Structure formats: structure tokens, C-alpha cells
Amino acid sequence: MDTPLREPTFLILTALAVEPMHGYGLIREVAVLSEGRLSLRPGTLYGALDRLVDGGLVHIDREETVDGRLRRYYRLSPTGATALHAETRRMRHNVDVATARLRKRGRAARPSVLRPVEGLT
């Protein structure tokens, strides 16, 4: 999988960077990480997880049965960790460039030389 990663994918990988998680846990964690901006539906999440597993970025960690239902846990693979690191570097670079440009814009908007105001000298 190439960068840039789409935001849901980035947040799923970010959630899995700490520990293996099951689907519902991932849905909650992505909501927390995005400060509520992103709410994954189960179909969207499991489609993304299938693609991430197929792409080698995520592995199935284990399966267990809870209340008669199968709960599958996913974990970030070494390839997924590399992709997440690459994406964070790319995003950090973009933020640094934008921040520098905004600083330059702010300096350009201010007068560079202070001139005396008539009647105050």
C-alpha cells in the first residue's frame, strides 16, 4: 500500500500501533483518535481490514469466542509499522512546509521597517 494513506486507514493503523484490537474496539479507538470526526461503520471497517490484511500491513493476531460470537483481533505488522512511519514523516513534512509558509506570510503582512509618525518625534 502506497502513501498517502486515506485518513481511515491511517487511523486504523495508528490504533493498532499500541496493541492488537478487535473490530468494535477499533471503531471506538478511531472515533477517539479523530476526536469524533470519523465514525467507522462495521462494513467499512471490515472492508478496510480485509484490504490491510491482504496488503500485509495488518495480521490477524488471534480469534476467540465471546458470548457465542467470534471475535477476531488484528495487529499491526512490521510492514504496516513501516508504512505508518512513512506516512507520519510525509505528513510532518507537509505540516512543516505549511507552517513555514504561514510564518512568511505573517511577516510579509507586517511592515518590515518602523517609520516615525509625524508629530510624535
Image: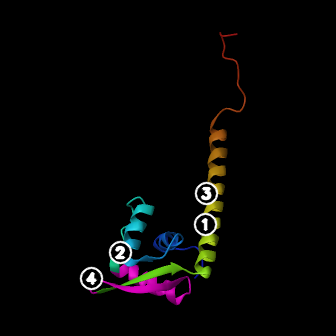
How far across and how far down the image is residue 1, in percent? Answer: 57, 82
Helix, strand or loop under label 2: helix
Q: Which stretch appears magenta?
A: 43-68
- The dot on residue 95 is 3
Percent across and percent down for residue 53 are 50, 87
Viewer can see residue 29: yes
Q: Do labels 3 and 1 touch, CB within 8 Å?
A: no
Disc 3 to disc 1, how far (Cα)?
10 Å
The type of residue carrying mark 4 is Asp
Horizontally, is 10 left or right of 83 in the view?
A: left
Q: Which residue is mark 1?
A: 88
Q: Residues within 10 Å of mark 1 (few under 14, many from 20)?
A: some
The picture quadrant where one finds residue 68 is bottom left
Q: Looking at the picture, which amino acid does disc 3 mark?
A: Val
In the picture of the structure, the residue carrying the numbered disc 2 is: 24
The nearer-to-camera label among 3 and 1 is 1
Q: Amino acid at mark 2?
A: Tyr
Could you tell which of marks 2 and 3 lies nearer the N-terminus? 2
- What residue does disc 4 label? 67
Q: Nearer the viewer, residue 66 or 27?
A: 66
Color encoding of the figure: rainbow
* Mark closer to the observer (2, 4): 4
Residue 120 among those drawn in magenta: no
What residue do we see at 48% from left, 70% from top? 15
Q: Residue at x 43, y 81 (%)?
A: 73
**Farthest residue in the left direction?**
67
Nearer the observer, 121 or 66: 66
Q: Where residue 79 appears, x then y in whole percent?
A: 61, 81
